[in-house]
Amino acid sequence: MSEFLASLHPIAVCFLVCAAKIIEITIQSLKTCMMVKGQRAKAAGLGFLECSIWGLVVSTIIGTLGDNLFLLLFYCIGYATGLFLGSTIENKIALGTSNLELIANDENTEKIIEYLKEHDRGYTVFDGRGSTDKMNMIFIVLPRRETPSVLKDIRTICENKVFVVASEVSKYAGGYGMVK
């Protein structure tokens, strides 16, 4: 690999290093998300691919980074771009499960329950008190990729008069339509 890189124009090597680093760090970001979400086999596969890129391309030039500031700059640009790209891709594929906690008055709670029943979604409602009125807390667990559309629909039917807390769920068991 060293001879191949030595045969290339220095600018081409900079771009090759940048592209390799973008791919490697994008894979690393996705691998980390999959590990956190319990998708160990997929994470291991991505880890193998990430390690292969590191072993074949990046480690070949690592000794010369301090001697070539342009190479170091392209290496850093590739790293930063890979982080951005990896998190953007993970956000698009939306791995995992979300928990929505909605706080609404009685009227909006009924609208939300009707919506959830129409869309065959499980939910749990608790009676509560807000600072001025009786309020209800509605818990919903759903696939993360569906969260934006469900939230949009609920905000629309409640005319944005609902308080929402969305969080990621690492583990769950049982539940209507959610047995795992």
Image (cartoon, rainbow, N blue to C red):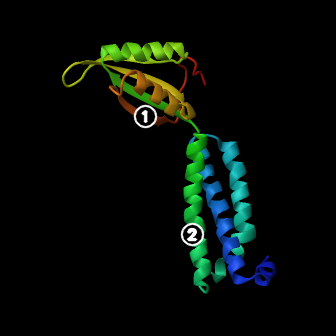
Figure quadrant of residue 93: top right
Determine which of the numbered discs, if any, sits on residue 20 in the image: none
Q: Residue at x 31, y 14 (%)?
A: 106
Q: Is residue 119 left or right of residue 128?
A: right
Tag 2 near tag 1, CB within 8 Å: no
Residue at numbered disc 1: 166
**14, 143: nearer the viewer:** 14
10 Å neighbourhood of mark 2: few (<14), some, or many (≥20)? some
Helix, strand or loop under label 2: helix
Write the residue at 69% across / 49% down: 44
Q: Would you place residue 82 above or below residue 60 in this image?
A: above
Q: Quadrant of the N terminus?
A: bottom right
Left or right placement of residue 34 versus residue 56 in this view: left
Q: Nearer the viewer, mark 2 or mark 1?
A: 2
Q: In x, y percent, where is residue 35? A: 60, 46
At which x and y percent is residue 122? 51, 18
Q: Residues within 10 Å of mark 1 (few under 14, many from 20)?
A: some
Q: Up-down: is 96 above or below 132?
A: below
Q: What residue is disc 2 on?
A: 77
The image quadrant of residue 72 is bottom right
Residue at 42% x, 18% y is 112
Q: Quadrant of the C terminus?
A: top right
**Residues at marks 2 and 1, CA–CA distance in whole angstroms:** 33 Å
Q: Position of residue 147 (x, y in %)?
A: 51, 32
Query: Quick check: 173 left or right of 112?
Result: right
Viewer-side residue, 161 vs 123:
161
The three-letter amino acid code for the residue at tag 1 is: Ala
Q: Mark 2 or mark 1: name the one nearer the start of the chain.
A: 2
User: Residue 138: where, in percent of width, then height?
Assistant: 39, 21
Residue 44, compared with residue 6, is above or below; it is above
